[in-house]
Image: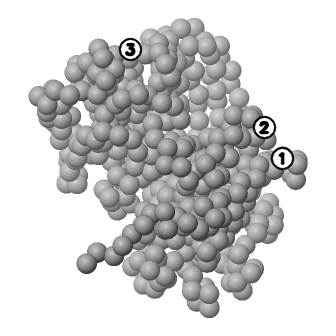
Amino acid sequence: MRPYFDPDYENFSQWINPPRVCIDNATCNDCTLVKVDSVNKPGILLEVVQVLSDLDLAISKAYITSDGTWFMDVFHVTDQQGRKITEKKTIDYIEKALGPESLKADSWPGKSVGMHSFGNHIAIELIGTDRPGLLSEIFAVLANQHCNVVAAEVWTHKMRVACVIYINDDATSEPMKEPSRMSTMEEQLRNVLRGCDDDGKGSCTSFSIGSTHVDRRLHQLMLADKDYEGYGGAIEEKDDMLFRPVITIDQCEDKGYSVVNIKCKDRSKLLFDIVCTLTDMQFVVSHASVSSDGPYGIQELYIRHKDGKILDSKDEKERVIKCLEAAILRRVSEGFSLEICARDRVGLLSDVTRVLREYGLSVLRADVTTIGEKAMNVFYVRDPSGNPVDMKTIEALRQEIGHTVMLNVKRVPSTTKSPEASGWAKTSFSFGNLFGHCSRSESFTDMGQRENQLAGTEVTIKIFTS
């Protein structure tokens, strides 16, 4: 006999004690505090971090505790320009997404396809071996099938590529319904991926109707693909060594936690990537402290398995370290970004990626968004040989893809001090001070930072390292 389940009863504590959200712009001069108090439930930390991540908010500090039945956390956030969050629309979104209205089934579902609504679509998920020109071939297949790409996100890591692409019929703006057309498209995409399958890991193509959180789904695809066990090309391995995080796992046995300490170069969405990976690996983050200072970030997370057990074997610790390292490095890229804002049309992505391919450039990541009739696409590109991209190549790209743009070059001095040398690690808050346990790893290696920007009207090319 199946046990009786009453969803209203299961959620009763949340209705009695609804989540409380406070947006505080008075306490700190340089950031906004987002405070969340709620009944504890599985996955709540990921939900909160996901909302802040979808808004592209920078988290400079965070204090998280969710042991027992109550969840409390404080985030110090700014926008990408380092300013407080004062826009009413953004504040309303946070309050509705994390507050009492979040209990409604149809309220603020978070990022499914970007932060915008694209209507009906079909999602295509692809995973396979990366190679130069692969993205161009994928978009060419979709263009030949008269598909409109309304949104897409592409990640590469360790010579593997994962894509989530949202399409609809160009003529009707509705999901395609003809089985023969879908079958043809699937076969052609599989042939494209199969043509570069030389690492023995295989490839996969799948279709689904509905929506998912794109970033989380890409992490899930690559985690299931075990990209953390792979080996990239010589250039990618060199990048991994340069940006490799320092991760250690220790025990806080008297409190029954495993303590994960992470030091790495700070960047946007870092906390989301770490919490997402731990959640999908069936771990619960009970306490955490997060700090950042300049280009560096540190995170201290007290975790357990869902069944309450700690990490008690060397192999398990090594696997968690590898998976977290991969989650951090998937968004790390070196090269330049090509931002394109243009009127959307079928074949636009195919044309752009074909030009990049003809110039011998590899796409490391791509973020495609459509708002109304406007396509807003970002491609993170580099020379596959690892050589600096010649400025003549950039100029030729600009001439072929876009119109005349203004050139503005801004150099940022490289940072040579380690976190300890700058005094940053000494001032960061640690839950270890409360639990009688504090683990600190060796200092960072020197991580230089350079930034050149080409800012324009139609097409913007930015030189970046992250």
On screen, residue 9 versus residue 76, left or right, reads left
Q: In what element is the residue under mark 1?
A: loop
Residue on which disc 2 sits: 86
Q: Position of residue 50 (x, y in %)?
A: 56, 50
Q: Amino acid at mark 3?
A: Arg
Q: In the image, which is nearer the foreground, mark 3 or mark 2?
A: 2
Left or right, 376 with respect to 139, comes to right
Q: Position of residue 335 (x, y in %)?
A: 51, 36
Q: Earlier in the sequence, mark 3 or mark 2?
A: 2
Mark 1 or mark 3, which is nearer the start of the sequence? 1
Q: Which mark is residue 345?
A: 3
| Most distant residue in the bottom direction | 254
- Residue bearing the label numbered 1: 25
Relative to 351, does residue 58 appear above or below in the rendering? below
In the image, residue 70 lies at what x, y percent? 65, 71
User: Which quadrant holds residue 139?
Assistant: top left
Task: Name the element at disc 2.
Answer: loop
Of callouts 2 and 1, which one flags the residue occurring earlier in the amino acid sequence? 1
Which kind of residue does numbered mark 2 sit on?
Answer: Thr
Quarter of the rendering occupied by the N terminus: bottom left
Compared with 31, 228 (above or below) is below
**Residue in front for this viewpoint, 147 or 144:** 147
Q: Is residue 176 left or right of residue 331?
A: left
Q: CA distance from mark 2 to mark 1?
A: 8 Å
**Closer to the camera: disc 3 or disc 1?**
1
Identify which residue is drawn at 35% across, 40% down.
210
